[in-house]
């Protein structure tokens, strides 16, 4: 199974241009593909249901073929879900830190 670096997600309280709002997560997020350093900025609203570890710690994200397979046998932080059409993500905990796996469907 492929596993390649995709981005780093960094929580922030600063509003940034190009943010997209994810209503269910009560989260504003930027597209890491618009950052030379592949940074995804995350700005959470009060009452966000996202785990505290994701809200307070940076995470590294890896592109994989299958999110569920990549997460097998690892402590689950956030069950796999579709964050956008064709984009599936899930989070695990590795050495106390959040790690994201994502797959992007090709058309």
Image (cartoon, rainbow, N blue to C red):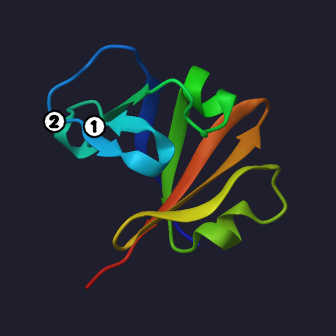
Q: Nearer the viewer, residue 10 or 2?
A: 10
Q: Furthest-top residue in view? A: 14
Q: Which residue lies furthest to the bottom in this view?
A: 107
Say which residue label 1 marks.
Answer: 30
Q: Which residue is drawn at 39% across and 14% down?
A: 13
Q: Is residue 40 left or right of residue 96?
A: left
Provide residue 10's location: percent of width, then percent of height. Answer: 45, 25
In the image shown, does 77 or 105 lie closer to the viewer? 77
Q: Which mark is first along the chain, 1 or 2?
A: 2
Q: In this view, does 28 lie above or below 6?
A: above
The residue depicted at 26 percent of the width and 19 percent of the height is 15
Q: Helix, strand, or loop for circle 1?
A: loop
Q: Which residue lies furthest to the front in this view?
A: 47
Residue in front for this viewpoint, 94 or 54: 54
Compute the Cα span from label 2 to label 1: 6 Å
Q: Which secondary structure, mark 2?
A: loop
Q: CB of mark 2 within 8 Å of CB of mark 1?
A: yes
Quadrant that contains the N terminus: bottom right
Q: Is residue 53 above or below residue 92?
A: above
* Residue 70 pos. (x, y %): 66, 65
Task: Give the x, y percent position of residue 73.
Answer: 84, 61
Q: Can I make out residue 57 in this image? A: no
Q: Horizontally, is 90 left or right of 82 in the view? A: right
Local crowd size for mark 2, using a 10 Å CA cut-off: few (<14), some (14–19), many (≥20): few
Q: In this view, does 93 lie to the left or right of 91?
A: right
Please give the name of the residue rendered at 66% of the width and 70% of the height, measured from the top-left corner. Answer: 68
Where is residue 88? Give x, y as percent: 48, 66
Would residue 16 be visible to someone looking at this image?
yes
What residue does disc 2 label? 18
């Amino acid at each position: 199974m492929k596993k390649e670096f995709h981005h780093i997600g960094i929580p922030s309280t600063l509003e940034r241009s190009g943010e997209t709002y994810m209503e269910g997560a009560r989260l504003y997020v930027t597209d890491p593909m618009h950052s030379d350093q592949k940074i995804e900025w995350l700005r959470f609203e009060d009452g966000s249901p996202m785990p505290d570890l994701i809200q307070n710690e940076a995470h590294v994200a890896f592109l994989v073929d299958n999110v569920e397979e990549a997460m097998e046998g690892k402590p689950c932080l956030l069950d796999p879900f579709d964050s956008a059409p064709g984009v599936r993500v899930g989070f695990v905990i590795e050495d106390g830190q959040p790690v994201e796996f994502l797959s992007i469907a090709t058309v």
